[in-house]
Image: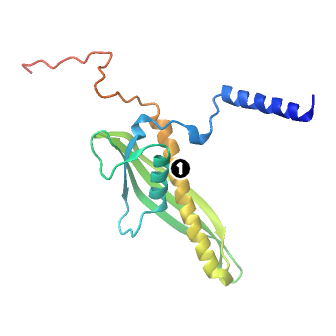
Amino acid sequence: MPAPAVLRTALIFLVLVMSACGFRLMGNRQLPALLEVVFIDLQAPYRVREPPVETHLRALLQRRGATMRQRPGPGVTAIHIQDLNTVREVLSVGSDGKALEFLLRTTVTYRVERDGAVLVPNDLLQISRDFSFNADQVLAKDAEEARLRAYIQTELAELILIRLEARLGRIIVPSPGVVPAVPVPAKPSGA
């Protein structure tokens, strides 16, 4: 067999094996029904603009086909993001007493509700990254820290969505007007 034919056969075999085991590209996942209409509520006092975690989560949901709402309401899943906090800690100090490495630790708590019911109770996520610091390049290192903070928050948004898909994907949402298979007993009129 010529080399291109072997390569083509191996590629077809690989694609068939991957699809047979359930592998799908991340962008092709179906959004759970509970995330089709969403309101994102970020509780961050004294904020000047939207933090990257909110912006990126909104963009991820919209890219996957979700409709975003400006306020909660019936049939709207509310994602409450709170306690977004970033801390910078010194990891190492040079012989002159100046910091050489820092650790950025960002934590966020989120909760999901729909129609007054809590679907996902408060859940805490934390991501930390370290970076080096050079006193001779203060402006460049400040810009690097700002980019790292934004990157961490976009990672948090992706983690929130992955966790929500895993937890909410198992919940079946009845369609409006569909009668449940098991009849619900009526309340006695005298009670």
Q: In the depicted view, which residue is nearer to us: 3 or 156? A: 3
Q: Residue furthest left?
A: 190
- Give the image quarter of residue 13: top right
Q: Position of residue 123 (x, y in %)?
A: 44, 47
176 in relation to 183, above or below: below
Count up the numbered dots: 1
Q: In the depicted view, which residue is nearer to us: 25 or 171? A: 25
Residue at 50% x, 37% y is: 166
Residue at 45% x, 52% y is: 58
Residue at 93% x, 32% y is: 2
Mark 1 — residue? 158
Left or right: where 179 falls relative to 47: left
State the SS at label 1. helix
Q: Position of residue 144 (x, y in %)?
A: 61, 71
143 in relation to 30, above or below: below
Q: Which amino acid does the dot numbered 1 rest on?
A: Glu
The answer to whether residue 97 is seen in the rendering is: no
Q: Position of residue 170 (x, y in %)?
A: 46, 30
- Give the image quarter of residue 3: top right
Check the image and tell me how it is coloured. Answer: rainbow
- Give the position of the N terminus as an image quadrant: top right
Residue at 82% x, 32% y is: 8
The answer to whether residue 54 is seen in the rendering is: yes
